[in-house]
Image: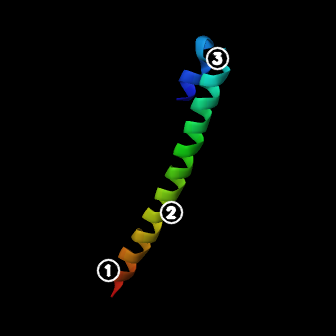
């Protein structure tokens, strides 16, 4: 997506830049949430395997 934002025809379109930036922010937030969930599940699995 970052490469798309860097294209001149996209960079010149304020609405498109705003839309893509918001989508990137949303995807980053979702990625962080999923990583936290994965870390929690991984930790639980390690505890389970240790029993």
Q: Secondary structure at mark 1?
A: helix
- Give percent across and percent down for residue 15: 64, 24
Name above or below for residue 34 compared with residue 12: below
Between circles 1 and 3, the one closer to the viewer is: 3
Query: On the image, numbered disc 2 is attached to which residue?
Result: 36
The reply to whether discs 1 and 2 touch (Cβ–Cβ < 8 Å) is: no
Residues under labels 2 and 3: Cα distance?
35 Å
Q: Which mark is residue 49?
A: 1
Q: From the top left corner, tell me how far across and down residue 51 is, in percent.
A: 33, 88
| Sooner in the amino-acid sequence: mark 1 or mark 2 | 2
Q: Residue at x 39, y 81 (%)?
A: 47
- Between the residue at mark 1 and the residue at mark 3, the CA separation in whole angstroms equals 53 Å
Q: Nearer the viewer, residue 22 or 45?
A: 22
Q: Compared to 34, does 1 lie above or below?
A: above
Residue toward you, 24 or 16? 16
Q: Indicate whether 17 appears above or below 47.
A: above
Instruction: Choose top left, top right, bottom left or bottom right for residue 4.
Output: top right
Mark 2 burial class by Cα count in 10 Å: few <14, some 14-19, many 20+: few
Q: What residue sits right under mark 3 in the picture?
A: 13
Q: Are marks 1 and 3 in contact (CB under 8 Å)?
A: no
Relative placement, left or right, of 14 versus 31 is right
Q: Give the mark toward the camera: 1 or 2.
A: 2
Number of labels in the image equals 3
Residue placed furthest toward the bottom: 51
Q: Residue at x 56, y 38 (%)?
A: 24
Sequence-wise, the earlier of marks 1 and 3 is 3
């Amino acid at each position: 997506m970052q490469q798309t934002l860097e294209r001149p025809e996209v960079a010149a379109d304020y609405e498109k830049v705003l839309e893509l930036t918001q989508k990137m922010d949303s995807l980053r937030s979702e990625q962080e949430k999923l990583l936290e969930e994965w870390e929690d599940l991984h930790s639980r699995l390690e505890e389970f395997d240790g029993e």
